[in-house]
Amino acid sequence: MSTNNSNQKRQAPKSAKKIANPEGPLTVFTPGIGAVSTTFMAGVELIRKGLREPVGSLTQMATIRLGKRTEKRNPLIKDFVPLADLGNLRFAGWDIFGGTAFDAASKAGVLGRDDLELVRPFLSSVDVMPAVFEQKYVKRLKPKIVKKGKSKMDLAEQLREDIRATMRRHGSKRAVMAWCGSTEVYIEEQEVHRNLKNFEKGLAKNDPHIAPSMIYAYAALKEGIPFANGAPNLTVDVPAMNELSKMQKLPIAGKDFKTGQTLLKTVLAPMLKARMLGLNGWFSANILGNQDGEVLDEPGSFKTKEVSKLSVLEHILQPNLYPDLYSDYYHKIRINYYPPRGDDKESWDNIDIFGWLGYPMQIKVNFLCRDSILAAPVLLDLVLFLDLAKRAGLSGIQEWLSFYFKSPMCAPDLYPEHDLFIQMTKLKNYLRFLMGEELITHLGVEYYSEDSATSKGRRRP
Ligand SMILES: NC(=O)c1ccc[n+]([C@@H]2O[C@H](COP(=O)([O-])OP(=O)(O)OC[C@H]3O[C@@H](n4cnc5c(N)ncnc54)[C@H](O)[C@@H]3O)[C@@H](O)[C@H]2O)c1
């Protein structure tokens, strides 16, 4: 039997997807011109000027293995899949404070003065348009410039006009929208979110359960633009938006960028489960002093974030399958607003675990991170991958992008995948699938050794 025959045993996608080329400018719309979005914009500009490296971005720095290990094919992801070039990105957004993106970046205080001065003309030229805002959804912020409209549908129409005008100005035929606005107060799915018909009726009748973030998402999808949700708000995680995205043949993704503490949690918890170590308790505390922290200090917005952060352990540890290890752990999350820290968040995790014969042990984690420095490359990757997904004809929820989210959206009959390394395998396999490359199963040497008794001379992968 030849090596080729043995390869046929592996799962191989039949054909590559047809993917249109990423020609011309790509406009990135961000509702919310705050710490994350301005750190992202400034970073892209510094990187494309050759002044900084895109650290933290898979699309810019990571490689992807193709074929067998012996083939030594490890191209950069950006050389493997046709992604938009950073030089072609254009930016625009909406905020309640007016001013320029330079003003917002200065206020956010993430990047140093020297870095900001290098991109001052660029950031000052980014369009910041008046926002669609409703005070009850973000109680801690007092808006300066907001749109007025007869109904929520009217506000959606105004956003659509903003989108069209901006894209005309940028000369772009493609765009992606990513919610980088504040975390809205907690709401649950209602009748108005159940299907598109109800939702559009709700927009016309000013239904109170339609949050501003949903109006932006609706406007984007109606304009043929993919949408990602960087916050834990419901936004596109409702059937009406899923229906619209499929109808418009557009990809959507969310929710809540996976950065700091949750990033660590989705690495440590799989380790506990992989080694069948039990868990008695996990206490997560945070202090942060940026505007996001101020918004999250309000109980309604905190609840939205808390639900997003809490869901992680349950899905990774699967207490239903491992009741002796995980059915009775205590999980607590605290987020404390502490102004002196600004964007330099600090998190502490105290993890009480148990091992052989039930003997207790402890793990302590203290992460001194920078929130927006971790979030900016996530946003960049999502923008580029969603644009790719649209050009590849993908629509609806993009589970292969779960890697980037604290609370990944998934089909209603599935549960979300939280384990960072399963998420990464899924993402890379999806890229291989899109390009018609063999999926990597990591079956490896043992798979081949087993067969080698009957087929001599087969090459090991
Ligand atoms: N930084 C991280 O690591 C991280 C991680 C996960 C999620 N997030 C989420 O990303 C979002 C942005 O974070 P940030 O640190 O940039 O916050 P930020 O407060 O600096 O920026 C958010 C901006 O959104 C604006 N805004 C609020 N409602 C709006 C509306 N309806 N329309 C337009 N603009 C609106 C605010 O005025 C503010 O300028 C937050 O929801 C945050 O929870 C951040």
Image (cartoon, grey):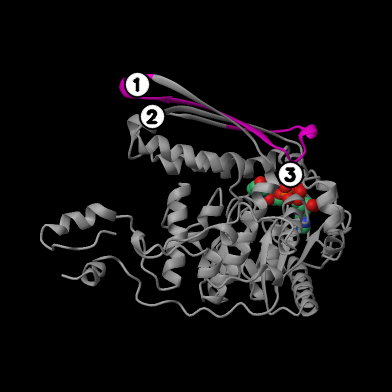
Check residue 355 for magenta coloring: yes
**Dot 2: element:** strand
Quadrant where the C terminus is found in the figure: bottom left
Judge the density around disc 2: few (<14), some (14-19), many (≥20) Cα neighbours within 10 Å: many
Judge the density around disc 1: few (<14), some (14-19), many (≥20) Cα neighbours within 10 Å: few
Image label count: 3
Q: Which amino acid does label 1 sit on?
A: Gly
Residue 358 numbered tag: 1
Q: Cβ–Cβ below 8 Å for labels 1 and 2?
A: yes
Asked if the residue at label 3 sits under 8 Å from ligand 1, the reply is: yes
Residue 278 numbered tag: 2
- Percent x, y of residue 252: 57, 65
- Percent x, y of residue 307: 57, 42
Q: Which amino acid does label 3 sit on?
A: Asp
- Percent x, y of residue 104: 83, 53
View extreme (left): residue: 454
**Residue at image point 45% right, 51% down:** 417
Asked whether the viewer can see residue 138, the reply is no
Depth order, front residue of 429/253: 429
User: What is the spatial separation of the Cα atoms under label 1 and label 2, in whole angstroms?
Assistant: 8 Å
User: What is the spatial separation of the Cα atoms under label 3 and label 1, in whole angstroms?
Assistant: 40 Å
Check residue 215 for magenta coloring: no
Looking at the rendering, the stretch of residues picked out in magenta corresponds to: 333-359
Q: Quadrant of residue 440?
A: bottom left
Asked whether the viewer can see residue 119, the reply is yes
Residue position marked by numbered label 3 in the rendering: 292
Depth order, front residue of 77/74: 74
User: What is the spatial separation of the Cα atoms under label 2 and label 3, in whole angstroms?
Assistant: 34 Å
Q: Cβ–Cβ below 8 Å for labels 3 and 1?
A: no
Q: Earlier in the sequence, mark 1 or mark 2?
A: 2
